[in-house]
Amino acid sequence: MTEPGTASSSTAERAEVPDAAVDRSRLTVVVNPKAGGGRAAKVLDGVRAALARWAEDVSVETTKSLEHAEELARSAVAAGRVAVALGGDGLVGRVAGAVARSGGVLAVLPGGRGNDFARGLGIPRDPALAATALVAAVERRVDLPEVNGVPFVGIASLGFDSDVQVIANRTTWLSGQSVYTYAALRGVAAWKPARFTVTIDGEPPLEHVGWTVGAANGPYYGGGMKFAPDADIADGRLEIVLVARTGRFTFLRLFPRIFSGRHVEVPYVQVRRGERLVVDADRPFQVYADGDPIADLPAEIVVRPGALRLLTPPQA
């Protein structure tokens, strides 16, 4: 990997990928059967049947790993097919990266625990209904961000969020928003403020002491928490959210605001915007994006404007 902070490392400067020819009536469903505690496998038959009602050719490919999902997505694009990601946001991010680099078209069906990217697009939460609605979807050019070269679709964050994600990923008896709320409440007790160094678009570095640094392409994470309420997947920028140091009691008292996005109104939350963020910290953290650990510090987060051809509901 090129050292974060150098101009040559910015993937936003990559040459534009030519569009591949895609037949929207031919679909390859890339499914992670373990997503959502097995939810994706349970809904697969209904999804397949719903797609078959309007698509001429529907094939289903089961992933063995995220790397395998990328291979399946590339093969779908090469065959002139729409790649349909059925799983959690982590799967969506990796499939999106492979599709964007191949010039193909991506569709998303909710099959994980959080499904925050689909939520932000207004895709129906029921996978079969979402599959039916896909027939009326429109193609949009949307942004695709990356952390140290690894693509994601929603929000990348670190600090307190890293600790929360570890707890959430180990918790199998809850789902959706509940698991992330539980993990956040568990994480507060052991948290100690971290010291972050944050550089946005090459400006002088700023020191941020507190809870979290996040870079958002879309508004939601954590099963419906509106972490970045004004994030736009097609504006060519990241919404950068900095949550500064505050007492645990204050944090817990104001925590419910995150579900409506009103947390950004309080003094200790700062929102910036930029195309490139370089971040480090005074202790090791993994950067989590779309629910998965995808990079260690130091990390460079960049956005590739309009890099992804995405099928979305007409009103998205």
Image (tube, rainbow, N blue to C red):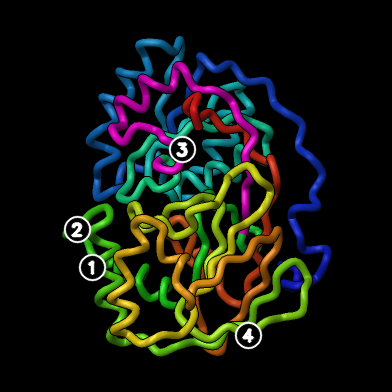
| Of the two numbered discs 3 and 2 in the rendering, the one whose residue sits closer to the viewer | 3
Mark 4 vs mark 1, CA separation in Å: 30 Å
| Numbered disc in front, either 1 or 2 | 1
> Is residue 241 inside the magenta stretch?
no
Instruction: Please rate how many residues cluster around mark 2, counting C-alpha atoms within 10 Å: few if below 14, some from 14 to 19, many from 20.
Output: few
Judge the density around disc 4: few (<14), some (14-19), many (≥20) Cα neighbours within 10 Å. some
Upstream in sequence: badge 1 or badge 2: 2
Percent across and percent down for residue 110 are 36, 38
Residue 63 falls in which quadrant of the image?
A: top left
Marks 4 and 2, the one that precedes in the sequence: 2
Residue 207 image label: 4
Q: Residue at x 62, y 65 (%)?
A: 272
Q: Tell me, yes or no, whether the two marked residues, 1 and 2, touch with CB atoms within 8 Å.
A: yes
Element carrying mark 4:
strand
Q: Amino acid at mark 3?
A: Leu
Residue found 41% across the figure and 77% down from its top: 160
Residue 125: x, y in percent? 31, 36
